[in-house]
């Protein structure tokens, strides 16, 4: 059950030639990569299994409201209210797709908020 030498050092669920995710085996008896046409007989996979898991982060469920200010990255920008150097920011597409995004800034010290259309 030795697999052929490959260019990628990957697990069995990935194509050893191009690195694409391999589909589940189908009825024809072989597993074929949709990208590069690499083929592997299903008999080579007998007795093997693939296990997957999901990990959820606590505190999710914001419902697309953007990151809370404490989780946003910091940019070199002076707060106009308290003159603190460094503000958190996040971006959202508020207008049509052919226009720029809106940048929201929050001061970590006094919680002053402002927005900038870019």
Image (cartoon, rainbow, N blue to C red):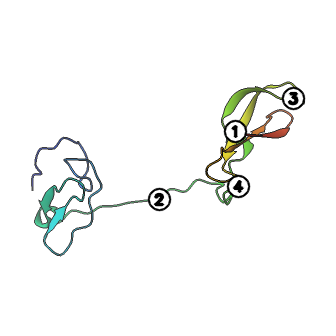
Nearest to N terminus: mark 1 or mark 2: 2
Compute the Cα span from label 3 to label 1.
Answer: 19 Å
Nearest to N terminus: mark 1 or mark 4: 4
Nearest to N terminus: mark 3 or mark 4: 4
Compute the Cα span from label 1 to label 4.
Answer: 19 Å
Dot 1: element? loop
Compute the Cα span from label 1 to label 2.
Answer: 36 Å
Q: Which residue is mark 4?
A: 65
Q: Decide: few, some or many residues near mark 2? Use Cα within 10 Å; few <14, some 14-19, many ≥20.
A: few
Dot 3: element? loop
23 shown above or below 112: below
Say whether marks 2 and 4 touch (CB < 8 Å). Answer: no
Nearest to N terminus: mark 3 or mark 2: 2
Where residue 96 sits: x, y (%)?
66, 54
Say whether marks 1 and 4 touch (CB < 8 Å). Answer: no
Residue 80: which disc? Answer: 3
User: In the rendered image, which quarter contains the C terminus?
Assistant: top right
Residue 118: which disc? Answer: 1
User: In the rendered image, which quarter contains the N terminus?
Assistant: bottom left
Compute the Cα span from label 3 to label 2.
Answer: 43 Å
Dot 2: element? loop
Nearest to N terminus: mark 3 or mark 1: 3
Q: Decide: few, some or many residues near mark 4? Use Cα within 10 Å; few <14, some 14-19, many ≥20.
A: few
Dot 4: element? loop
Where residue 33 sits: x, y (%)?
21, 58
Compute the Cα span from label 2 to label 4.
Answer: 23 Å
Nearest to viewer (mark 3 / mark 2): 3
Q: Residue at x 24, y 55 (%)?
A: 35
Residue 54: which disc? Answer: 2
Compute the Cα span from label 3 to label 4.
Answer: 24 Å
Q: Foreground: 115 or 23?
A: 115
Q: Residue at x 11, y 44 (%)?
A: 5
């Amino acid at each position: 059950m030795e697999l052929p030498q490959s260019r990628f050092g990957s697990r069995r669920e990935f194509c050893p030639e191009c690195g694409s995710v391999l589909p589940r085996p189908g009825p024809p008896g072989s597993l074929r990569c949709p990208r590069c046409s690499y083929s592997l007989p299903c008999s080579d996979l007998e007795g093997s299994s693939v296990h997957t898991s999901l990990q959820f982060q606590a505190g999710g469920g914001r419902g697309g409201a953007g990151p809370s200010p404490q989780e946003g990255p910091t940019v070199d920008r002076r707060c106009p209210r308290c003159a603190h150097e460094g503000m958190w920011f996040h971006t959202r597409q508020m207008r049509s797709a052919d226009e720029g995004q809106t940048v929201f800034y929050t001061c970590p010290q006094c919680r002053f908020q402002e927005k900038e259309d870019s």
